[in-house]
Image (cartoon, coloured by chain):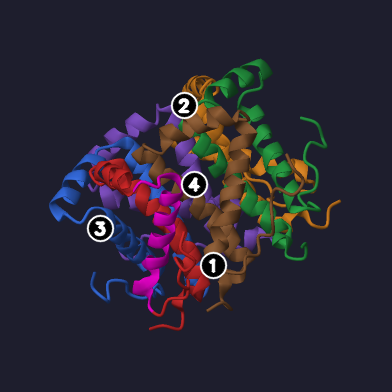
Chain colours: A purple, B orange, C green, D brown, E red, F blue
Amino acid sequence: MPNDWLPSLITSTRQDSYAPPVLLSRMAVKLIQSDAAFREKLRSEYEVDADALIAVPHVAATQFSTIAATNNYWRNIQ
Amino acid sequence: MPNDWLPSLITSTRQDSYAPPVLLSRMAVKLIQSDAAFREKLRSEYEVDADALIAVPHVAATQFSTIAATNNYWRNIQ
Amino acid sequence: MPNDWLPSLITSTRQDSYAPPVLLSRMAVKLIQSDAAFREKLRSEYEVDADALIAVPHVAATQFSTIAATNNYWRNIQ
Amino acid sequence: MPNDWLPSLITSTRQDSYAPPVLLSRMAVKLIQSDAAFREKLRSEYEVDADALIAVPHVAATQFSTIAATNNYWRNIQ
Amino acid sequence: MPNDWLPSLITSTRQDSYAPPVLLSRMAVKLIQSDAAFREKLRSEYEVDADALIAVPHVAATQFSTIAATNNYWRNIQ
Amino acid sequence: MPNDWLPSLITSTRQDSYAPPVLLSRMAVKLIQSDAAFREKLRSEYEVDADALIAVPHVAATQFSTIAATNNYWRNIQ
């Protein structure tokens, strides 16, 4: 695992807020499945699965909550 | 991904509070399934699935919690 | 979607605390299934499903947490 | 729904902390299945289901978190 | 239910932090399945189930969050 | 269970933030399945399961939220 895989959770725009969650989720996935080719195969399964299309935003919502708190909800950004 | 896809999380009315979660969830879905036609097909599956009709509000509840905190629970709005 | 579908999250009694979550969940369901007759049909499925009877209170618990925080946990109400 | 179904979330002991979540979950279940005999039948299903024995404590954990915050984590109770 | 089943949520070490969640989860399970022999049988099912080995830590993570907040994240403990 | 299994939740870098969640999850798993060989077998099942690759990051997201709060979101770390 590289030492600098996770950049700051502070993001300059709301639009960037999904970058840390995506990185965090990918790292969690790598921790249980280290084979990139296999991860790609599994991805091809869940990207066509209706349940997964609900489950993935649930994980994103949980991570987004943390990132939003980190950034004080971007209240000072118009 | 457009630079301005996520408008402010601050909403002027409680009724608008679902707009950011809907945008956030759609973006999460797009990140795993970029094909719009395919997303439409999957949507046609889960909109007739009883489990999905419980799972989707669960995701919405998680996002709503973040948006409500952002807006200090709209305590100052009658 | 009517402009005034979501009344204040501030409730005068604890007993009223479930009204906003119920409204929020119904609106989330409507966003994915706009056909009322179809929603009724799906409801008839999950109201006889043991898993759903656990999943629905889970969603309610998540929403209740937000409403309770909004109301400062009704600490000033006997 | 009786007007006084939900007593105070403030509990005098930690041991009482599960009473409000149990009440809240039962009320959520009643909102989707109003037939008591049917609820009893569904209960007889999930009380022998290993998945349910994990899912129910998950709901309880979510509710407990709210009740614990309400009571300032019973920090002043030995 | 004994009156003193739940000891303080304040723990002197981080290592003890799992004791309250384990007690809380066991109590939740007992509330839905009071027969100890039956609980043991169900346990023998989920302890060999891969999904359960993910679901149980999810419940533990939710409870741990509450216990960590209770203890101010053990920030003063080296 | 060793007395010192859980090191400080305070981490010096964001990159280290996944170490405590991984430890916490492993301990939760050990509490329900004490046989290491069996845990390895179950792991070989879920590491090739698309649903598990979504469920595991969900658990990690919940734990990460606690660790991030513990560390005041690493706001003082560049």
Task: State whether discs 3 and 1 lie on one chain.
Answer: no
Query: How far is the residue under mark 3 from the one under mark 4?
Result: 27 Å
How busy is the neighbourhood of tag 1: few (under 14 within 10 Å), some, or many (20 plus)?
A: many
State the residue position of label 3: F30
Residue E21, x across and y down, in percent:
42, 62
SS type, badge 3? helix
Residue F50, x across and y down, in percent:
32, 36
Residue E23 within the segment the image draws in magenta: yes
Q: Are marks 1 and 2 in contact (CB under 8 Å)?
A: no
Residue B17, x across and y down, in percent:
71, 44
Quarter of the figure with the C terminus of chain C: bottom right
Task: State which mark lies toward you, 1 or 2.
Answer: 1
How busy is the neighbourhood of tag 2: few (under 14 within 10 Å), some, or many (20 plus)?
A: few
Task: State whether discs 4 and 2 lie on one chain.
Answer: no
Residue A12 within the segment the image draws in magenta: no
State the residue position of label 2: B35
Q: How many marks?
A: 4
Report the magenta stretch's main SS: helix
Q: Amino acid at mark 1?
A: Arg
SS type, badge 2? loop
Q: Amino acid at mark 3?
A: Lys
Query: How far is the residue under mark 1 from the one under mark 2?
Result: 51 Å
Query: How far is the residue under mark 3 from the one under mark 1?
Result: 27 Å
Along the line of sight, the residue nearer the viewer: F28 or B60: F28
The label number, if any, that marks residue A60 in the structure image: 4
Task: State which mark lies toward you, 3 or 4.
Answer: 3
Q: Amino acid at mark 2?
A: Asp
Task: State which mark lies toward you, 3 or 2.
Answer: 3
Q: Are marks 1 and 4 in contact (CB under 8 Å)?
A: no
